[in-house]
Image (tube, rainbow, N blue to C red):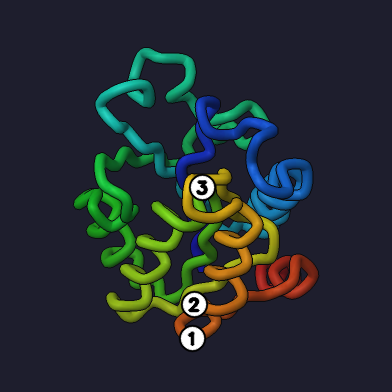
């Protein structure tokens, strides 16, 4: 198993996120447990060509989730993490079949990545409250979260409790 932490950048990790405090606490806990159990944590940053760009502090990974020295970081310019060729090749060379995916934004990049991982044959694990969204003009962030985590993803991924996710990392 590998853990993918996506788009947890300073410009996105703000208290306007749905369930902000639990999101931050749970992502940090998964990272901590993965490290303690020698499960590799991979980071993906979104470069949108505007505000989230290298050199801008908002592009940097939020302090709560900072990669340790030696942990791999990849950059994407599209929604899916699989748009990054280096990440795709790294995962293929690692012969990994299970990905625990978490990060931002639930109904955009996380959704696209979950579906892309499934299409590539990966077993996808999504721990509860480790992705989040913002309100938008069509629906609120809670609806986006629940729609993806409770309706869409259970068809293609294992949406698990934090306790279940931690137990998986400890195996």
Q: Position of residue 13 (x, y in %)?
A: 59, 34
State how far apart marks 3 and 1 are (Cα). 20 Å
Which residue carries the number 2 mark? 152
Which residue carries the number 1 mark? 155
Which residue carries the number 3 mark? 104
Instruction: Identify which residue, 12 or 95, lies in the foreground.
Output: 12
Res 145 quadrant in image:
bottom right
Looking at the image, is mark 3 or mark 2 earlier in the sequence?
3
Q: Position of residue 122 (x, y in %)?
A: 39, 77
**Residues at discs 2 and 1 in contact (Cβ within 8 Å):** yes
Secondary structure at badge 2 equals helix
State how far apart marks 3 and 2 are (Cα). 16 Å
Taking the image as drawn, is residue 32 in sight? no
Left or right: where 99 falls relative to 85: right
Left or right: where 31 falls relative to 152: right
Q: Position of residue 101 (x, y in %)?
A: 51, 61
Looking at the image, which residue is at 40% across and 37% down? 45
């Amino acid at each position: 198993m590998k853990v993918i932490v996506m788009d947890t950048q300073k410009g996105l990790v703000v208290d306007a996120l749905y369930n902000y405090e639990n999101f931050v606490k749970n992502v940090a806990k998964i990272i901590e447990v993965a490290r303690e159990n020698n499960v590799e944590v991979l980071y993906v940053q979104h470069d949108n060509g505007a505000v989230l760009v290298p050199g801008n502090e908002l592009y940097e990974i939020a302090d709560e989730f900072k990669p340790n020295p030696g942990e791999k970081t990849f950059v994407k310019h599209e929604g899916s993490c699989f748009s990054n060729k280096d990440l795709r090749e790294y995962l293929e060379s690692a012969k990994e079949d299970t990905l625990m995916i978490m990060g931002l934004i639930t109904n955009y990049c996380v959704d696209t990545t979950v579906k892309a991982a499934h299409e590539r044959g990966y077993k996808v694990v999504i721990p509860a409250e480790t992705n989040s969204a913002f309100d938008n003009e069509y629906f609120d962030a809670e609806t986006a979260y629940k729609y993806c985590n409770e309706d869409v993803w259970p068809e293609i991924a294992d949406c698990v409790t934090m306790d279940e996710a931690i137990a998986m990392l400890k195996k």
